[in-house]
Image: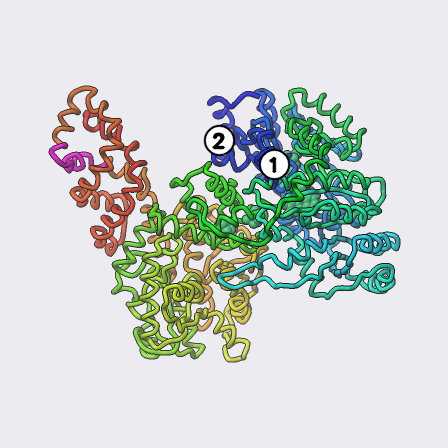
Amino acid sequence: MAALQAADKRSLESLFKTRVSFERRERTLYGHDIAEIPSMIKPLVGSTVPDAIVQPASEEELVALVRWAREHRTALTPRGRASSGYGGVLPVKGGLVVDFFHLSKLLEIDRATQTVRVQPGICWEKLDRELAKENLTLRLYPSSYPAATVGGWLAQGGAGFGSYESGWFRDNVVSARGVLADGTVREFSGSDLDLVSEAEGTTGLISEVTVKVMPKEELGVISIGCPDAHDLQLLVERIVKDRLPIWSLSFINPRMAEMKNRAPLRMHADHAVGERVLLPASYVMTLAFREKDRRRIDDVLPDLFKTCQAELLSDRIAHHEWDNRFEMMVVKRLGPSLVPAEVVIPLSSLGDMMAEVERKISQPVVKEGLVIREGAGGNPEVVILGFIPSDQRKFSYNFIFPLSLTVMKIAEKNGGRPYATGLYFAGKAGQILGRERLERLKEFKAKEDPSNILNPGKVMQGGVMASALSLGAAIEPLIRPLGNHVISKIGERPTQSVRDIPADVAWYAYTCSQCGYCVAECDQFYGRGWESQSPRGKWYWLREYMAGREKWDQQMVDTFLVCTTCEMCDTRCSTNLPIEPSWMKLRGMLINEEQRMTFPPFEMMAAALKSEGNIWAGYRKDRMDWYPADLKAAHPPGGKAKNVYFAGCTASYVEHDIGQASVRLLDKAGVDFVHLGKEENCCGTPMLVAGRWDLFAEIMKRNIELVKQAGADTVITSCPACDLMWRQYYPEWAKKLGIDYPIKARHYSEILAEQIKAGKFRFPESEKPVTVTWHDSCHIGRASGVYEPPRDVIQAIPDVKLVEMSHNREQAHCCASVLTLLKEPPVAADIGKVRLDEALAAGAEKILSLCPCCQVQLRVTAEKKGMPIEVQDLAHFAAATFGYTFPDPNPEVRKQWAVFEAFIKLLTPQGFAGLMGTMWPELIDAMPLGMGPMMHLLGKVPGTVSLMKPMFPVLFPRLLPLMLPKVLPTMLRRVEEQIEMPQYMREQMPDLMPKVMDRLMPHMIGDVVPLISQPMIDYLQGKS
Ligand SMILES: Cc1cc2nc3c(=O)[nH]c(=O)nc-3n(C[C@H](O)[C@H](O)[C@H](O)COP(=O)(O)OP(=O)(O)OC[C@H]3O[C@@H](n4cnc5c(N)ncnc54)[C@H](O)[C@@H]3O)c2cc1C
Ligand code: SF4
Ligand code: SF4
């Protein structure tokens, strides 16, 4: 198929606007799935980098796309969340990857028929959350529920949790719509579903699916230990025979239990947050059933146990296994790679199959099984997913990989088959799908897609790779000993850094299972919609970097920097990776150690912070302007007490209501506290996330010293970022730097909540009832685990109704403040809108928050997007009930943000080029060594200055540092003309601007020169 020409790209752009990407890096990230093919056989697959990625947003767009592809003879490879591992999503013939991310709406819930109509890109978790609102739930779902899409599962086919009762997914689909290769749309139902299910998009792009659902009922779970696979088989056979009312039946083998026992727990800061529940070294079977059926199951089980040596395991084990059912990939931490092997076998051969695997494969094979009560042909079947731990970076991976064929052969011998076709097992399509069905698919494909544009090379079209695997299966007994003789190490062992990537981060990059659980919930992803912004994309990029196929540039540095540090990914990761802390480590490496460029506005903040101790460029002398005069006697700024209230920069300089209301509440609560006074500094968060760790350490030391001088042992905060510093980062860094840190941090909401509970603090009756919702700021929620105290405060206020947004507490979405806001304000507004939409959907009149930065961001978003919701500070809201009045922060936020946004635009190559374009006379005159007059002269000789243009990239980096100081007064005047700033900022500009330019210019000059070259030539030639 032909490669894309410039005109093709233009036409795709006109069809999909910003929802098409031709970027090389992005394309690489859309060219793989979860499987890691060994180096020796990878060449057989060929290039899997698509020519472009398109993201249709409607069925009409899918139709237009298919027509376009047919006309341009371009292959289309559909992609849900790419959580499959059979190569179905690999664009083996180039062309376009069709990403269904924007086709992910829930269209209709029909309670009467208990069905739900959805777009194909909706993920199971999201769908289930929506169903729960209607008291419905899914009949079954894959164990990739947090990532996989409905369309992807239908196209791939499969079984999952709930399959014991509900069978294969296809049997739970009522109908599906698909866009065929000629652009017509067809509805598939009944036996015609065979034409799309397991067809992997080779016959049509699924545009809509109607799925059966069921009433949501309380589930009970029990786990059973069984020492032997034959006994396990016996037990399951009895459960099936006795028709026990089980909804889901899954199990793991003893190796998996052992590996789970060894896998690292989820960490937070420097401590484990996951619970270690040790599993016995046996088959651990977990049954999920409707709680109402518990008695029946309890009555029968003891009798069943008599047939085998099974034992009931503790409730703790059962709940732990069930609650962590999506995290089976955690064992990958010990690899860092896993060789997968997935098969379907009759239940009647479970024991023999397991025993034979143990006999023939010397490597540890960890297995997970799912039982289907009525599988193909109405008989019970078992899906077995096996993994062999290995290390893809080692050559021996090439030998261990073929052991998956051993598992397959054993399954076939025992009446089984491979799980799916995709790219790799297309040669087994007859076995997997059945001969008759395969013929029907082939006929349909030949008739409807004669040009073979829909997912070519898959399912029924075995290519070189499928043939190689068939050959491999034939000679499996010969190659098996190679794999069996490899000595595999098991355990997390990050030993050395790779290129400049720290050893632990390098290990995690290979550990990442590419499952995609972290993708859709990462605000950087859903704000932009591209894989490169997601944690999964970043890990994959790091692998490419470590393999020497990528290098750092400013775009990649920015991609890592722009992460909002929301920590959502850490809570979702199927392998418990410390993702956000890894990015934090890279910030330090990139900016602090390697001296690359951080986001330019941070340099302005850094300059202001150095001279005046705050990031808003206010004067230190004005830091206490907000402090209520009548509290100075009881809580003196600069005084001594056991508690210090730490206001932070934004409350001190922008949103005064936060600080004022917080101290009012603390005073009302009888807390003995002081304030550090004008000496208080920024907490340092912006410098930490900017990678300016030199400044962070400096500022931290000053703040710790001040608290010690105040004789305090507790810092009370209102700002979550300040809280995070005092609670977690300062102690960590203090330890690292050998500083004594006898300080603990508390948030004012924790103190109030305690007093409320103890009956010591009461709010007065309010004047009018109001419905509010609570925004869990990431830095006090996920980072510090303070979820309930603010809610306790709100609920203690009479006549206030608290409604929850659908993402709350640990799952709360980030507002997109600070990093995204500084880097790309329009993206920040898109992300912020997601949060405000949820608040409106919850029926809230106000969204309460306690974070100054969230409040700035949400206010800016509400204004930009015209959203009818008030953003208010919690302390302001709560203290107002006592009759206190506070300044409306909105005008100040608007004013100061406008200045900041203008600086964000100015501190870019385009901004600088524009600024320079306003001062050519001064710049040319400032050239050293009499070059200015010479340039003027050359400008008069036609064509001469243009001849010099190629020298500009070499010349200007040398000249500009000499020129800029001379033009500083003009530059400052121009900046003042462009940006309407407050007097105090204007006064400081002569000091701040040179510092900012000094830091930024060396990095930016390369991008600025091409932008100024022609305008300068035009000026010299008198054209402008
Ligand atoms: C941790 C983990 C657990 C898993 N557990 C299970 C499990 O329990 N059961 C199971 O069956 N699988 C499981 N899988 C595999 C995988 O998650 C499933 O196959 C899943 O359904 C794939 O969904 P997806 O959206 O990621 O599809 P993708 O992987 O993106 O695509 C799968 C196939 O469908 C095609 N496709 C995708 N969308 C469309 C569309 N709209 N129209 C036409 N074709 C399309 C693709 O081209 C590809 O061939 C697991 C994977 C992981 C990583
Ligand atoms: S911390 Fe938040 S923004 Fe950063 S990668 Fe994780 S989910 Fe995305
Ligand atoms: S970072 Fe974790 S959640 Fe994300 S793709 Fe990797 S393993 Fe999955």
Label 1 – label 2 distance at C-alpha? 16 Å
Asked if residue 767 is positioned above or below residue 604 in the image, the reply reads below
| Residue 854 in which image quadrant | bottom left
The reply, left or right, for residue 834 in relation to residue 640 is right
Q: Is residue 806 above or below residue 27?
A: below
Label 1–label 2 contact, CB within 8 A: no
**Residue 922 or residue 319, whichever sits in front:** 319
Q: Quadrant of the C terminus?
A: top left
Whether residue 843 is visible, yes or no, is no
| The quarter of the displayed image where residue 66 is located | top right
Ligand 1 lies under 8 Å from the Cβ of mark 1: yes
The magenta stretch is: 918-931
Q: Residue at x 39, y 52 (%)?
A: 588
Specify whether residue 925 is painted magenta. yes
Amino acid type at circle 1 is Arg
Q: Position of residue 966 (x, y in %)?
A: 16, 42
Q: Is residue 782 magenta?
A: no
| Residue pointed to by mark 1 | 79
> Residue at the spot x=49%, y=36% of the render?
26
Q: Is residue 448 above or below residue 836?
A: above
**Residue 590 in view in this figure:** yes
Q: Which mark is residue 22?
A: 2
